[in-house]
Image (cartoon, helix red, strand yellow):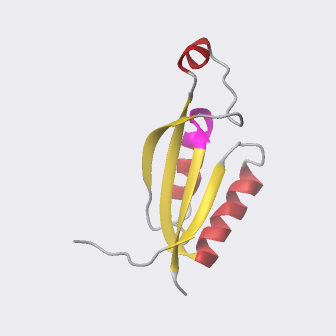
Amino acid sequence: MADVLLSLTMPNDVAQHIEDLLLSRPDLVRGFTATMAEGHGAVVPLVEPAELVSGHSPRLQIRLAGTEEAMRAVLALIKAELPKANIFFWLVPIIEMGRL
């Protein structure tokens, strides 16, 4: 089965919960990369005064690769554990992956 890339973009207040959840499942998650991001657009609620001034909301983006079956299991796990976490995700095929 080919590997896929799962990207998760989330509010900072749920980021630690998601990281802990992913780390608790080494059978599904070999590792991941987390980077800071900024959420923009109509679907991103701006709540804090600084967000209203800047026009964006801080987010964390996590990217992880694995089999499609494992990544779909990760999505199901997140949905079961944090059903209202407001996480945007996308799943794309990986053409090639490796280390240099």
Quadrant of residue 45 within the rendered picture = top right
Q: Residue furthest left?
A: 100
Q: Which residues fall within the magenta stretch?
A: 10-15
| Observer-nearest of 67 and 16 | 67
Residue at figure coordinates x 48%, y 57% from the top left = 63
Q: Position of residue 52 (x, y in %)?
A: 61, 16
| Observer-nearest of 2 and 81 | 2
Q: Position of residue 43 (x, y in %)?
A: 71, 37
52 falls in the magenta region: no
For residue 99, above or below residue 37: below
Residue at figure coordinates x 62%, y 39% from the top left = 14
Q: Position of residue 5 (x, y in %)?
A: 51, 67
Q: Position of residue 69 (x, y in %)?
A: 63, 77
The rendered magenta stretch, by its main secondary structure, is classed as: helix
The quarter of the image holding the C terminus is bottom left
* Relative horizontal placement of residue 3, taking residue 41 as reference (left or right): left
For residue 47, above or below residue 77: above
13 falls in the magenta region: yes
| Observer-nearest of 29 and 12 | 12
Residue at figure coordinates x 44%, y 48% from the top left = 34
